[in-house]
Image (cartoon, rainbow, N blue to C red):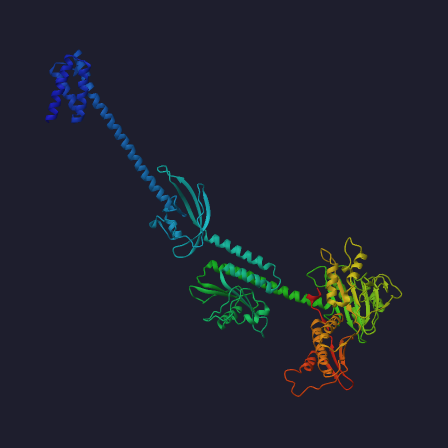
Amino acid sequence: MSAVLAAFRDAYANALRLHLDSPTQNTLAEGYELGRRALVEGVSILDLTEHHFRLLDRAGLVDTAKGTETGTRAEAALEFLLQTLAALDVATRGFLDINRSYELQRLRTEDLEGRDAFRTALVESLQDGFFVADSRGTLTEVNSAFGAITGYGPDGAPYPLPHPWAADDGGKYPDLGTEAARFVMPVCHRDGRRLWLAVSTSSLVKPEDDERIFVGTVRDVTAEHDAQARDQAVSRLATAVAGGTSVVEVLTVGLEELRRAIGAETAVVSVWPNRQTGPELYVSGPVASTGDAEPEGSEKSAATTESEAAVSRQVLDARARALLDRARMRPGRTMFAIPEGASTSEGIVAPLGETGDAALWLRFAAPRAISSGDWALFSLLVGHLSLAVQRARNFDQARSTSLTLQRAMLGPIELPPRFSVHYEPALPPLEIGGDWYDVVPLRNGTIGLVVGDCVGRGLSAAVVMGQLRTAARALLLRGAGPAQLLGELDTVAASIPGAMCTTVCAAILDPERGLIRYSSAGHMPPVLADPGGKGRLLEGGRAVPLATFDPPQRPEATTPLAPGSTLVLFTDGLVEQRGVDINMRFDELADELSGAADDPPREVADAVLSRLRPAGGYDDDVAMVVYRQPPRPLRVDVPAEAGRLAAVRRELAAWLSAAAVPQELAADLVAAANEACSNSIEHAYLGGAPGRMVLTADCAINQVTIEVTDTGVWRPLPEDPGPRGRGIAMMRALTDELVIDNTGAGTSVRMVVTLPAVTFSAASRI
């Protein structure tokens, strides 16, 4: 037995004896203190209880038979024992509570460890990438799926800003805020591939430090994004080329859109119109040959038209031309990369259409790998462009055929001198309608004129018009006069469905005699304006429209044409306007012709159309013929002085304009006449008295004659004229005929030119 236990037992025995002798609260307190001492010194409860009962047995306070304490002293002894054990009981309960709390904490810790393991397993099992980011944007945790998607896995975490997968052109991250967010962003995979990720994030606040963190998932949506981008690119290309009605229009906009959609630097289409000529090139973007050297002047930023094809043909070297030539012979919708079989490509080449006469070359700014998605996009875009080009070709062919037929029906393209015509259909894009004109030179020097208007509009009226115009021209060439022509047309119109009530004005123009014979079948009367006078209506020879009645004989009228007068024949679309009295429109037309004698017929036609055009444009077909009767001969008699030359040139130019001489030819005649006048001034009266010179000009049906005369001395050209003496050569070059007569008194220089036929294209007529 240890000394500590022996000392405790002695102290307990003394304290118990004092309590039994005189029990008080103080003695009980001594027992409680002994219990605390036992707790400190490690005395067990069993040892304490056994020592207590031994002391009672010695004192005779225990019933041996029953093993219990007896008497009042025994009760006091039990009370002392319980007070001693009270301190030990409190300590025991605290210990048990601590043990219970520890067990609970241990179980809770084990549960949390299980939960962490479960969370880790759950996060790792996600097919989507998972991440946790702090408020500064640093990704503190990612799962393996995140690494599989981006190439940056859990081993490299944390990932601070800027993140290694950020795309150069991806811009800034959106502000995540405090609400759930969803967005799509581009990233760059560790291996260099460009990806698109759908990101979904939520935010929460950590309770231990009130820091806001973000958790989210990422999903690879590159395939969906590329498919949508392909659909959008195809839609943009289809929309861009939808409005093109010619190959030039389709390729001008189509190549630009194709180049932008594919990301190519240059797009070139080569078209072989036929086997005899080289290809025509259409280019979008800067052009450089595929060889080592880039040709000079190879930068072209717009689509090349046919007129530039000869220049553009020089920008490609032999290798590029060979590639395009080989590509056009491949089956449609096939393409190959340049160079074939390499890991990266400089561009692609493909046939355009299935006719073997067009090919496409797309050149990248730098070599790049072409994915399966790229090939799918290229195939769709090239297919749409091929269809658009084929559609434009079909449209071009149909339009060319249609225009050829329309122009054959419309009227002559080449007109006699001093004529101008205008035709404007009410239903574009048709170039014909129910109205027509015809100008027919006849064998006796006269000119037949016909202006007509069929009932209705559009193509059906044009069919009727074509038949009547052909019949009228045949009658004119056979020698029919205006009245006879309309009488014959009555019979023709009666046999043509839809020709009834057609209005026609027919005339025979005699420029030499200055007469016009005309007859009208219910048509608008011609307008004739004398020089310096207001236009007047020629209302003679009027009768009913074609095939309406059977008159015994159609009337005819004759009117003289004053020199320099202007004649206008037209259809009712020129003067009819809803809500406006037609007489007011006739007055406007007559007023516009008041000062027309000094203007060329084309300018007269433009002025009339501009003056009478309604605000909303003409709503009916308009056909108009303008004719200028040759003006009176010009005679200018002036002193042979250099100061008179400018005035002579002005008078001659004005007369030539009134005579409807084309502007370039008029300039040549003025220059030739000026040279003849200069020779008279400089040489005819040299060393003698001043004299005069006379310039005359006359206009026949198709000729202009200018003559310059003087009464001076003819001086032959010296053998060596030096730098001068080129006047006669110049006059001969500027005229068709030059005659110099110096046999009599003075000299006569006569210059003759033949007036060319007036050629009108469809664009100038409409």
Q: Is residue 239 left or right of residue 711?
A: left
Vertical placement of 120 versus 711: above or below? above
The quadrant of the rendering that contains the N terminus is top left
- Residue 191's quadrant in the figure? bottom left
Q: 597 or 68, which lies in front?
A: 597
- Residue 116's quadrant in the figure? top left
- x then y, percent, for residue 423: 73, 64
Is residue 410 in sight in this rendering? Answer: no
**Looking at the image, which residue is at 65% across and 85% down?**
721
Vertical placement of 165 versus 514: above or below? above
- x then y, percent, for residue 654: 74, 70
Vertical placement of 99 versus 664: above or below? above
Vertical placement of 177 versus 284: above or below? above
**Looking at the image, which residue is at 34% across and 50% down?**
156
Q: Residue furthest top?
A: 72
Q: 308 or 718, which lies in front?
A: 718
- x then y, percent, for residue 459: 72, 61
